[in-house]
Image (spheres, grey):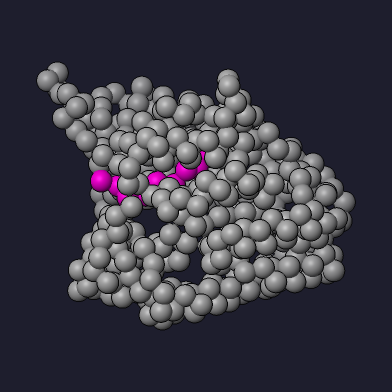
Amino acid sequence: MKFAILTLGCKTNQAESNYIEKALFELGHEIVDKDLERPEICIINTCAVTAKAEQQSRQLIQRYLKKNVKVIVTGCYSQYYPEKVKAIDSNIIILNNEHKDDVSKIIIPTFSKNFKASERTYIPKRHRPTVKIQDGCNNSCTYCIVPLIRGSARSVPPHKIVREIISYENSGFKEVVLTGIHIGSYGCDLNPPLSISKLLKLILEKTKVIRLRLSSLEVNEVNDELLETMSSDRICKHLHIPLQSGDDKILKNMNRQYTMKEYIKKIQKILYLFGEIGLGTDVIVGFPGEDDKAFRNTEDLIKNIPFTYIHVFSFSPRPGTKAATLPMQVDENSKKERSKKLKILGQEKKRLYIYKNIGKIKNVIVESESEEGFNGTTEDYIKVLIPKNQGVKEGIIFKIMIEKYYKGLAIGKSLNTIQKY
């Protein structure tokens, strides 16, 4: 049977979609490109973190129903709003997040009696596959719906994580991204307890060449042990540390577990240890009570921290969260104006970081080919375009020299040297 998977939202969703795809592929089903060939079944892995994500989820569901294909919906939107999904079409099959793996039981295998799963090797499309190390979150940020949907923090046993990474390494992959809903809490529920740092050390010990990248971490989880572990050449010098607001009053109302002084102090320590590390962040504009002064505090703080990119979100009241009922809700026009300002600031931050790296040598994993050339990502998360006819190919880490900045990208010159860790 021909199937396609469409994924919205976070890297955890991406990892879970890969697991679904692998299970179906090994049962004999055929993965097809949703844009080039009509699938018989479309699995839509949805998101509900914002109202915009909800809208995108509904639009995808409606689009593929019109194509007269069987639609299976999973993910956070259908988890939290199953009645809204059923209102679109009562024939839609809904799977809760904890039952995503059951997709393979719903779709009847199409292979013959002589079919052997071992005869088919699943290869993810992404050259930097995601590995899910945990699920759920124990934090109680007042704006966030995710703990209501995903539940409390639950860690994947370390031997399963190592086994998955070894399989990627044996298949020739050069980088994996460790992801989850709250990876800084990794191991808190295990017996005996573990930590993200100890997990990294275990992976480094059990694997040989694969490059490791961490997804989002809270600032108070970036401790001395983690920073010491990150000194390994095989761990990407890139951290994504959500800020959310640069105003202490707003942070308190968000129930974030740090002050601006603590945030700045930790960033300064990271920069002292690693210098030109890639630093990304998330910011929410228009949280209830965010007046002009609070927004300026956020804007000024971002200007003074050398972030290399910024993800900007307008506050979206989520039903069931405390923030949805707070007074002093910010009007939509103010949210749009503030969001635009920070996005422009983020573009400038990215440009300055690339300019700062012109003439420097980087290790870039080549991920895709376009008309302009090959696209890749450096260890510190610079997106690079390498013009064609320079001896590079997808899936390999090459040494390149950054030559210039162009339309949000670094233009790199291949030194035609394959990097081996």
Query: Where in the figure is residue 157, as x and y percent of width and height?
Result: 48, 26
Q: Nearer the viewer, residue 64 or 384?
A: 384
Q: Nearer the viewer, residue 412 or 101?
A: 412
In the displayed structure, does residue 226 sit left or right of residue 363? Answer: right
Query: Where in the figure is residue 149, as x and y percent of width and height?
Result: 62, 33
Query: Where in the figure is residue 372, as x and y percent of width and height?
Result: 29, 74
In the displayed structure, does residue 268 sit left or right of residue 334? Answer: left
Which residue sits at x=63%, y=74%? 345
- Residue 368 visible in the picture: no
Q: Nearer the viewer, residue 85 or 118?
A: 118
In the displayed structure, does residue 356 sit left or right of residue 162? Answer: right
Q: Is residue 106 magenta?
A: no
Q: Which residues are magenta?
A: 172-180
Query: Where in the figure is residue 69, as x and y percent of width and height?
Result: 34, 39
Residue 290 falls in image quadrant: bottom right
Residue reaching furthest to the left: 114
Q: Is residue 177 magenta?
A: yes
